[in-house]
């Protein structure tokens, strides 16, 4: 591919080691390129991420498993498998596991989230 320094990559979720997120839950970083970032987030029943926003990256959450809610600005949206949520920069958001089993969500950032673009609600 022209103009890209990242080579093709195939990643199996089960082979990636998860780490606790400073915002809550556990995350696995699957792919981080120059322009795109893919992570998988895991929230146990009753667990939620802290309310935050990204100053530069756009973000899409895609629910893979479980059920919950997404705080998105002033709204609360229902999460279930197959539901995608687009989050523009500067929009406060936080997923919450309201179900009885794990909530598993794919997170896509563009450009990649480096940690310097996150602002938590105080």
Image (tube, rainbow, N blue to C red):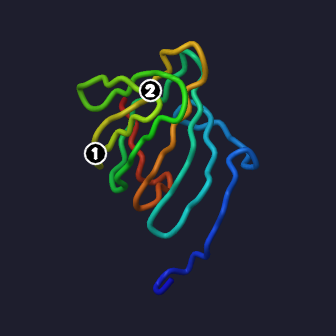
Q: On the picture, is 34 further left or further right than 10? A: left
Q: Nearer the viewer, residue 120 or 103?
A: 103
Q: Return the residue nearer the eye: 52 or 34.
A: 34
Location of residue 41 (image quadrant): top right
Q: Is residue 52 left or right of residue 44?
A: left
Identified at 60% across, 18% down, the residue is 101
Secondary element at image label 1? loop
Label 2 with label 1: CB-CB less than 8 Å:
no
Give the x, y percent position of residue 83: 39, 34
Q: Quadrant of residue 50?
A: top left
**Residue under the point 46% across and 62% down:** 36
Residue 52, position as x, y percentages in the image: 39, 36
Q: Find residue 71 and report its horizontal and vertical position in percent.
A: 34, 27
Numbered badge on residue 90: 1
Q: Nearer the viewer, residue 67 or 94?
A: 67
Instruction: State the SS at label 2.
Output: loop
x 40%, y 23%: residue: 69
Residue placed furthest toward the left? 74
Q: At x 54% / y 20%, what residue is drawn?
A: 47
Distance of mark 2 from mark 1, alpha carbons?
24 Å
Q: Position of residue 11 (x, y in %)?
A: 67, 57
The extreme bottom residue here reads: 2
Local packing at callout 1 (Cα closer than 10 Å; few below 14, some 14-19, many 20+) is some
Image quadrant for the C terminus? Answer: top left
State which mark lies toward you, 2 or 1.
2
Query: Compared to 119, does 30 lie above or below?
Result: below
Left or right: where does residue 106 sit relative to residue 72? Answer: right
The dot on residue 35 is none
User: Which badge, 2 or 1, is on the more N-terminal residue?
Assistant: 2
Residue 80 badge: 2
Q: Residues within 10 Å of mark 2 (few under 14, many from 20)?
A: some
């Amino acid at each position: 591919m022209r103009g890209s320094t990242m080579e093709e990559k195939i990643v199996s979720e089960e082979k990636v080691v998860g780490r606790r997120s400073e915002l809550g839950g556990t995350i696995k970083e699957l792919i981080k390129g120059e322009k795109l970032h893919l992570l998988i987030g895991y929230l146990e029943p009753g667990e939620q991420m802290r309310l935050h926003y990204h100053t530069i990256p756009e973000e899409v959450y895609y629910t893979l498993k479980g059920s919950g809610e997404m705080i998105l600005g002033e709204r609360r949206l229902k999460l279930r498998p197959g539901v995608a949520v687009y989050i523009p920069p500067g929009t406060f958001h936080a997923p919450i596991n309201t179900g009885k089993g794990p909530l598993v969500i794919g997170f896509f950032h563009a450009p990649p989230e480096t940690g310097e673009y996150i602002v938590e609600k105080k």
